[in-house]
Image (tube, helix red, strand yellow):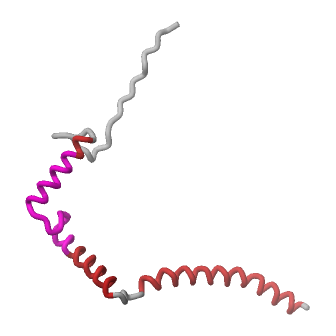
Amino acid sequence: MIQTNHERMIVTRLIPEARTLQTVLRRNYGVSAVLLQKAGDPIQQLFVDKIREYGKKKSAAGGKLVDSNPQIEKEMQQELDKVARQYGGGPGVDMTKFPAFEFTDPKINPL
């Protein structure tokens, strides 16, 4: 009887722990299986290769546009200026600065 109660106590403590461990292992397997899987499809592999190639070009460009020329950079600057004007910017206005709000109390006539 003592052994049975002792075994029952051990089993009742281990079942929830085993379920938790099973859940953790299932989640980790689901995440790592995707990461460890190689691209078997040639289209997927081509996509991955192009992303890696773009990453190398981006780091070589030093934060500027990849494969750009002066004409493209000029057009981009024109579009940025146009958007800045539409949203209250202009020459000499820092659009990265948070706007300063000024609130004034309305004038109320005393009774």
Q: Extreme top residue here?
A: 111
Main secondary-structure element of the magenta-colored stretch: helix
Q: Which residues are magenta?
A: 57-82
Count of numbered marks? 0
Q: Looking at the image, can residue 78 be seen?
A: yes
Q: Residue at coordinates 22% horizontally, 78% vertically from top-left?
A: 53
Image coordinates for residue 41, horizontal then vertical, percent: 35, 87
Residue 72 image position (x, y, % from top left):
13, 59
Q: Give residue 71's position: percent from left, percent from top.
A: 9, 58
Asked if one can make out residue 92 in the rendered structure from this viewpoint, the answer is no
Residue at image x 58%, y 80%? 24
Image position, residue 2 (x, y; %): 89, 90
Question: What residue sits 86% from the left and 91% below the top?
Answer: 4
Q: Residue 77: say if magenta.
A: yes
| Residue 93 horizontal side relative to residue 30, left or right | left
Q: Is residue 11 left or right of residue 44?
A: right
